Image: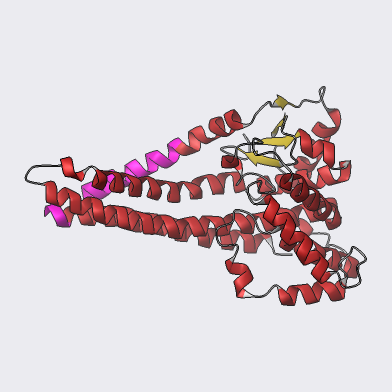
Amino acid sequence: MGSLGALRRGSLATAILVFSFLSFLLLGIVVVVDLVLSMSLFPYSLLVVVTLALLFMVLQWLISPFIVRWAVRGKQEVTQESNPWLFGVVQGLAAQAGVPTPRIWVSDDASPNAFVFGRTVRSAELVVTSGLLAHLNADEVRAVIGHEIGHLRHRDVVIMTWVSAVPLLAYILARVGFEFLRSSRRVRGKGAGQAILIAVLVAIVSYLVYLVTQLLVLYLSRTREYYADAYSAAATRDPHLLASALTKIAYGLSLARPDSEPSGLRAFFIGDPVKAEQDYATLQDRMSRYDLDRDGQIDAYELQRAIQMERSHWSRANELFSTHPPTYRRILMLEEIEEEIKRGGLPADVYKFV
């Protein structure tokens, strides 16, 4: 089980890399403009570009909860009166994690899923689909909610909102540059050549920064899913509950209609609806491969064998463009935690580690 300290260090390092690339991009734009136009406005032009970038990121941070809330279909707010059990579970797990109870919604999506979003931990909101409540038992639902509360405890709603703005900004700059090039035939006048050169350089650099930072953000997203899983395992003291829930979610999503919740929300969900069919097929293949005695469980020997087989760099490369780790990898990690519990139980200060 990775420690919360390791999570913070890894997240900090990734965030620093992402914002370093943003700094490189903004500085590069200013240098390109200054060199091409033979201007010497460096300190002031950099200030203007950085200010505009920050305004863009703050704007995204401000409006993103409204967009997500609008995108969730047929939602109804959960209160102590409307659903005392669900409200009590969320309230109890939030208190256990030391975070404020999020505002709770149930959407009428029939596929099993859940996610949290918000500007801050204090203003966070939790969405649970009706499919999750219908297809999972009470203990599994509690494990899924524990995962989502883990995201709040780890401040993921804040970190991912800010970090994901960087590749988006880089992509917008690249698209502006490429669209300018498409319309460059209509550009005339003394500075036409200089304008085209600036557009070419800005578009190329922006797109390269977009690709690199997008990979970093996806890596960060996958890492934080693992740690939210670890938190749920510690909070419920039964990792098998979340493993069972993840299997049901992967199966349910693989059967979901194409008109379920918008795929634009996929990064928020506990399970990725876009890759669910492939994910569930891979899960079945891996579990049948690793369950040598076909008893439906991965014992200690089978787990060690599976971990050795999963150390392949090629299998890791397949995850590069995924928002979520493969379900079978998440289950293997939960099986590791379960083996730790069997050997000696979780330490009394477990919350220092997750």
Image point 38% across, 50% down: which residue?
170
Left or right: 120 as drawn, with respect to 195: right
Q: With respect to residue 80, does 306 lie above or below?
A: below
Q: With respect to residue 68, does 295 lie above or below?
A: below
The quadrant in which residue 19 appears is bottom left
Towards the viewer: 109 or 333: 109
The quadrant in which residue 308 appears is bottom right
Towards the viewer: 231 or 252: 252
Give the extent of the magenta segment: 35-59
Left or right: 51 as drawn, with respect to 196: right
Q: Is 53 contained in the magenta span?
A: yes
Task: Give coordinates of residue 179: x percent, y percent.
Answer: 29, 44
Give the main secondary structure of the magenta stretch.
helix
Towards the viewer: 279 or 14: 279
Task: Give coordinates of residue 158: x percent, y percent.
Answer: 56, 44
Q: Is 258 contained in the magenta span?
A: no
Considering the image in quadrants, where does the C terminus appear? bottom right
Q: With respect to residue 325, does 300 lie above or below?
A: below
